[in-house]
Image (cartoon, rainbow, N blue to C red):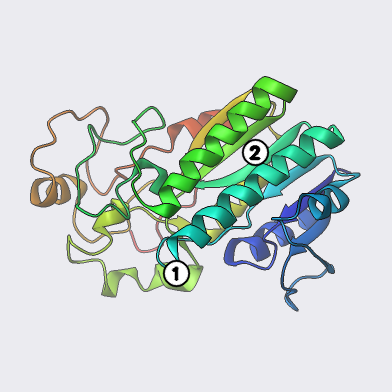
């Protein structure tokens, strides 16, 4: 049985991750600043911006799943969001390296590509957008996610800590996905996310599979559903919003997602569930 430390265990994704890991035989330590009555194990109350506390709470674990973060721009002040997300991730990697923990899986975001919170909307260089696409964030949240991926690379070079950077799409609960048909009929709706989504249960499975997968180095993975969840076909969405994009590098027929998840499928053996209303 592996012992896994999960930061952000009381969050939207954290709840599902903890239950998924427990169901698959892992021993889980929940780490957060608030406890949740929905979790079957107690929470270690920890300030992740304090390196000593992080060392203490991660000691004795086989791997770390780092989900704790402010989940977007403009929720708090820009400096607080940036400092919180970057410093906590640095401390997790610093403590993992010091404790001899060789595997960290952490929450990055599709916002690292720089479209979601950009001051002015700009088109991707090509579609579907994959992990090789340039990262061009200009906001506190996306920039912080880019830097956390650089932190991961630094600790691989220095201490051979391997990590998956999971670039999560727009995480939705099952009932939120069921409501899509009433909402997703306007090409401007969720445009900044390129209309992607991911079922929280599939996001949790990606976390677990990342912990199980063999890896030497740092690998970013887009964690999004196979389709957009829209009621408008993908090629029409492109024509209406990004007609200047001529570089199409994959099959975008039907409602196929404009962000590629193929690398996650190949690396993890992961498969998101189909859209429930197709």
Task: Give x and y (percent) for residue 103.
Answer: 73, 34
Circle 2 residues within 10 Å: few <14, some 14–19, many ≥20: many
Q: Say which of 131 and 54 sits in front.
A: 54
Q: Say which of 131 and 57 sits in front.
A: 57
Circle 1 residues within 10 Å: few <14, some 14–19, many ≥20: few
Give the side of residue 108 with respect to residue 5, left or right.
left
Q: Quadrant of residue 218?
A: top right
Q: Quadrant of residue 137?
A: top left
Label 2 element class: helix
Residue at 70% x, 22% y: name it: 158
Q: Earlier along the polypeptide chain: callout 1 or callout 2? A: 1
Q: For the residues carrying marks 1 and 2, which lies nearer the camera in this image? A: 1
As drawn, 206 above or below 73: above
Task: Give x and y (percent) for residue 39.
Answer: 76, 71
Label 1 element class: loop
Q: Is residue 25 visible?
A: no
Q: Is residue 205 visible?
A: yes
Report how far apart the C-alphas of labels 1 and 2 lie in the structure: 29 Å
Residue at 12% x, 31% y: name it: 246
Circle 2 sits on which residue? 210
Image quarter in which the N terminus is found: top right
Q: How many marks?
A: 2
Q: Say which of 10 and 226 sits in front.
A: 10
Q: Say which of 187 and 112 sits in front.
A: 112
As drawn, 3 above or below 219: below
Circle 1 sits on which residue? 75
Image quarter in which the C terminus is found: bottom left
Residue at 35% x, 64% y: name it: 277
Give the side of residue 179 with respect to residue 146, left or right.
left
Give the side of residue 101 with respect to residue 269, left or right.
right
């Amino acid at each position: 049985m592996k012992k896994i430390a999960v930061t952000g265990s009381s969050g939207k994704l954290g709840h599902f991750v903890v239950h998924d890991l427990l169901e698959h035989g892992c021993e889980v330590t929940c780490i957060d600043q608030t406890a949740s009555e929905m979790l079957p194990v107690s929470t270690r109350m920890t300030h992740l911006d304090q390196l000593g506390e992080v060392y203490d709470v991660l000691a004795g674990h086989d791997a770390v799943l780092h989900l704790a973060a402010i989940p977007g721009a403009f929720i708090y002040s820009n400096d607080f969001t940036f400092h919180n997300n970057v410093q906590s991730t640095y401390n997790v990697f610093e403590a993992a390296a010091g404790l001899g923990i060789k595997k960290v899986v952490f929450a990055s975001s599709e916002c690292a590509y720089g479209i979601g919170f950009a001051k002015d909307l700009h088109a991707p260089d090509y579609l579907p957008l994959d992990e090789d696409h340039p990262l061009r964030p200009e906001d506190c949240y996306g920039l912080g996610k880019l830097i956390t991926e650089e932190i991961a690379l630094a600790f691989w070079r220095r201490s051979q800590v391997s990590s998956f950077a999971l670039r999560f799409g727009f995480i939705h609960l099952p009932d939120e996905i069921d409501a899509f048909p009433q909402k997703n009929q306007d090409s401007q709706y969720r445009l900044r996310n390129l209309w992607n989504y991911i079922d929280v249960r599939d996001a949790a499975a990606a976390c677990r599979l990342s912990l199980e997968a063999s890896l030497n180095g740092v690998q970013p993975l887009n964690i999004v559903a196979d389709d957009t969840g829209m009621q408008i076909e993908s090629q029409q969405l492109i024509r209406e919003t990004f007609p200047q994009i001529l570089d199409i590098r994959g099959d975008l027929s039907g409602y196929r997602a404009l962000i590629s998840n193929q690398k996650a499928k190949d690396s993890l053996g992961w498969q998101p569930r189909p859209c429930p209303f197709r």
